[in-house]
Image: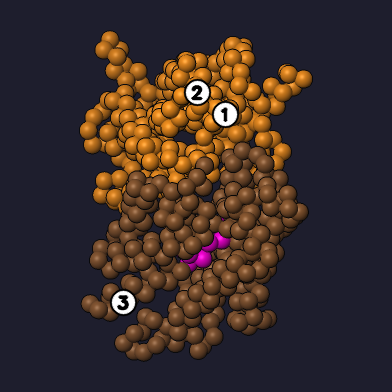
Amino acid sequence: MFQVVLYNVTNGLIIGTFYVLMALGLSLILNLSNVINFAHGNFLALGGYIAYVLSPHLGYWGALLVAPVVTAAFGFAVERLMIRRVYNRDPVYSLLLTFGLAFVMQDLMRYVWGSNGLPLGLPPALAQPLSAALFFITYYRIFMVVFVAIAITGLFAFLRYSRVGVRIRAGTLDLDTVAALGVNVGVLRSFNFALGCLLAGLSGVLAAGQIGLNPNMGDDLLMPSFIAIIVGGVGSLTGTLVGGLVIGLAAALTTAVYPAASEAVIYVIMALVLLIRPRGLMGEEGMMS
Amino acid sequence: MSGALARERPTTAIVIFALLLTAPFWLPYVGGYDALATRVLVFGLAAMGFNMLLGFTGVMSFGHAAYFGLGAYGAGLMLRYVTSSTMLAVVSGTLLGGLAGSLFGTLIVRRRGVYFAMVTIAFGQICYYIAYSWNSFTGGFDGLRGFSRQPIDLGFTSIDIQGNGTAFYYFVLLIFALAAAAMGLILRSPFGRTLLAIRENERRARFLGIPIERHIWMSFSISCFFTALAGALYALLNNFADPLGLHYTLSGEIVIMTVMGGMRAFWGPLIGAAVFVVLEDTISSMTVNWMSFVGIIFILVVLFFPRGLLGMLKRRDAA
């Protein structure tokens, strides 16, 4: 019984880290550019596939570091070519644009790599379980959680201490003023979009090591990421972090007790938050309109 | 733009209904068929209902598939478990989707802009989730089967919409016409004018003492009822209710139909639905990569035809 609970909690923690990583990327883009990136799950899958292509040449570790950067470069190009054209229009257009992009990306990935799952090989050291009793906890799972924790700490440090990071945070609050102070807002937004895609690509590589690759692998993460943002509060990255952890853990604990309701509980939390505190756990007043 | 509705000329409506009324006669010559025309009407109705919110209130929902799908399930479940009356099934489906929309709406209207859209998606996915997990009642992922539309009994005679596709088309056309008339009346009423005021300048409307949240909620609810009605008709058309009919992918398609046709024009969504349904039918018969094509349609419309087909015609008129 203890093992079953531990198994579910571990699973929940790992899924929660993916929710957080994905939601942080979405949230970055949403806060600065007011765009919901529907294709975020497809950037995740793309990151995984790029790692799959690179790992025979660079090895697993090389692919882990390079694939997210390539994904980010792709995101940068997409932003420059398409998304920045709709910033000043009704939000319906950016939604439709990323929605169409998601369709195209998913279909092209299926065309190139096939719709069947592909494995991403792990270094043997990571694939070992901790012990015979804890056979379900591999070193890889621990590595994933630690790596994600480092990545998130790095992101927050970057946003807090680097010049570009400070500009991104300032732009979230008041983009016009930032522009008036002489910051090239267009480049800032492109960079920020690429940063979001970097996080998605990183999740993709990590997820591929656990569940393998398929063209739809990001789809199931998209909705919980939305909910993490809504629960955490729009406009607050810390909120997104908290929101992702809350729903990840809630889903995991529910799975331990009553597996069928694990998805439902996420929606219940969202409804409760909207009912009691519409701006989200850590959202600021007025950020939602 | 605020006078867009007033400038809607009756000729557009006359041309549209002339084409729709004669469709079963000329369709076979251009490679169409009754079921395709019925699908155009159904999605046209769904998109026009949706456009009450997007085009005429200026609020963006990305979860309308949920109410479309609930309409379908409502009608299907009614026919399967309760009654053999087609009309009763349509009414039940409409009520189920519309009331669910009104209920969710109370929570959704607390947000604006893209966040409004995000919350509508999440609520939509709740319905999708329920439909595919409640296996014993809704048929789960395989969808709801085991029902079919029944002939309509008028007392003195009965209309066989079951075996006769053309009769069913006219049945749907009649409901479509009534619904379109109702929408037109709502939009011309003082209430409809208030919605336009909110779309044009929410802050100013608020200063005039208009209760914004209540109006947006009413607009959302009304549009859910119309979309649910379309969903109920869709279940009758296919004799099947599909959980994917609740998925946000379909919401996106409803939005693109609306934008493609022209969201500022009353008949725009119908035109968009016609183009989209016909294109999808053609493309999916030619290639397995239809998703790419649909995605490319989305991207092209957004980048190059943001005003939609009727919007472009209008601008030419004005010039």
Reading the image, the residue beneath label 1 is B201
Chain A drawn colour: brown
Q: Main secondary structure of the magenta part?
A: helix
Q: Is residue B199 left or right of residue A78?
A: left
- Which range is magenta? A18-26
Amino acid at the residue labelled 3:
Leu
Residue B235 location, x and y as percent? 38, 34
Cα gap from disc 1 to disc 3, whole angstroms: 54 Å
Reading the image, the residue beneath label 2 is B208
Reading the image, the residue beneath label 3 is A6
Please tell me which residue lies in front, A219 or B76: A219
Let me know if residue A21 is in the magenta part: yes
The residue that appears at 52% across and 53% down in the rendered structure is: A235
Q: Chain of mark 3?
A: A
Cα gap from disc 2 to disc 1, whole angstroms: 11 Å
The residue that appears at 53% across and 76% down in the rendered structure is: A150
Q: Residues within 10 Å of mark 1 (few under 14, many from 20)?
A: few
